[in-house]
Amino acid sequence: MDLIIRRAMLPPRVAPQAKHAVDIGIEAGRIVAVEANLAAVARDEIDAAGSLVTPPFVDPHFHMDATLSYGLPRVNASGTLLEGIALWGELKPHLMQEALIERAMQYCDWAVARGLLAIRSHVDVCDPRLLAVEALVEVKRRVAPYLDLQLVAFPQDGVLRSAGAFENLKRSIAMGVDVVGGIPHFERTMADGAQSVRMLCEYAAKQGLRVDMHCDESDDPMSRHIETLAAETQRLGLHGRVTGSHLTSMHSMDNYYVSKLLPLMRESGVSAIANPLINITLQGRSDTYPKRRGMTRVPEMMAAGINVAFGHDCVMDPWYSLGSGDMLEVAHMGLHVAQMTGVEGMHACFDAVTVNGARILGLEDYGVAPGCAANLVLLDARDPVEAIRLRAARLAVISRGKVVSRAPAARAALSLEGRPSEVDFKLHRD
Ligand code: FE2
């Protein structure tokens, strides 16, 4: 074999049958064995020593065309959504293809170092030059040997509201963009928003493509686009291929209405993506007190059987000045905002940045089982809850069977059992 990871603990929900440490055998970029005391030799071995080995983190909602542009041409002084949109408008005409590629490649390096090996990125198609599309298609080609990058054609200014946007969207699909996007709540009227959902879903159905729309990203309790998206999914037979992103208005909707909406989403197989870092900072912004959290109803959707994942959305761009590509930070925020501090809830938040996102992207060979792609992360933690608590160091990241990143351990000073070796207690006592 090429590589064996010895004594690995697997996430209980990824491998419910594995209660004890296992060895993972890897050959030609694939997992070929997962068993205790694997009797085989390999060219390289990693001793996990009882630490957690997980399939990689997945970010199902990101904007790679804007990432790492912090400070270009100026920073978002107020930190609000409106100033962010205005700032993106200022930046767009000055985007240079090479610089955009460079920033995106830098972000991919950050992502890999954090065990994030699959990203779905929206790309703005409202600029008729389609410069960002060209750039990200090139980035997708360059990172393909080690990172799954899926692109969504995203009409940021509205597919109906922005002249030529639908044509641009179709052109971008022909250039190699994978998924049909939309932003119905940004169209001029509720009726236009519904019309845009119908039009884009019909196009996706005809082309055999997946759909992922920014949907109801507002505090408006009357926003109804996720209902239209679910209904269109059902009408066109797109079950399992459609995702509603953000859905923040659901936070403010009438409870009776939501009790009808969730079964419809479940029935149509529509997935949902919450973006905890962004939703908690941008939504409820103009409220006085009490102030709404603005994140969608994550535990309620999960309880209704809807596939829910967490996305990062932004890192150091016009909308968000922070972030580092760390999906454990995203899970940590999601867990707190959704008050998912029960044992099941904490594990569900780990799923939301791993396996649930993989389902949205349609990654068929994702997991830790013979036949899966050998994409794995060794964490400096014993289980998913500790991983979230510590935003655990990624000791080793393996992509297509090759170790692509390593980092030193940091847990000794931070667990109940470990000795805080770096701290001189005598010094503090004296
Ligand atoms: Fe977004």
Image (tube, rainbow, N blue to C red):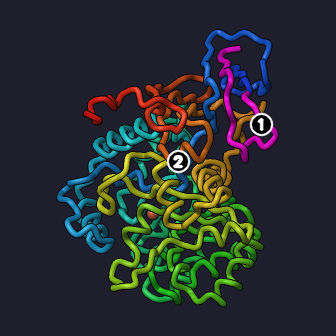
Disc 2 residue type (three-letter): Ile
Is residue 6 on the magenta stretch? yes
Closer to us: 353 or 1: 353
**65 relative to 409, above or below:** below
Residue range (magenta): 1-21
- Predominant SS of the magenta segment: loop
Closer to us: 73 or 196: 73
Badge 1 residue CB within 8 Å of ligand 1: no
- Dividing the picture into quadrants, the one containing residue 228 is bottom right
Q: Is residue 305 left or right of residue 157?
A: right
What residue sits 31% from the left and 29% below the top? Answer: 426
**287 relative to 325, above or below:** below
What residue sits 57% from the left and 85% below the top? Answer: 224
Is residue 260 on the magenta stretch? no
Q: Is residue 415 left or right of residue 368?
A: left
The CA distance from mark 2 to mark 1 is 20 Å
Residue 19 is tagged as: 1
What residue sits 61% from the left and 45% below the top? Answer: 384
**366 relative to 293, above or below:** above
- Dividing the picture into quadrants, the one containing residue 229 is bottom right
Disc 1 residue type (three-letter): Lys
Q: Earlier in the sequence, mark 2 or mark 1?
A: 1
Could you tell me residue 257's position as x and y percent? 65, 89
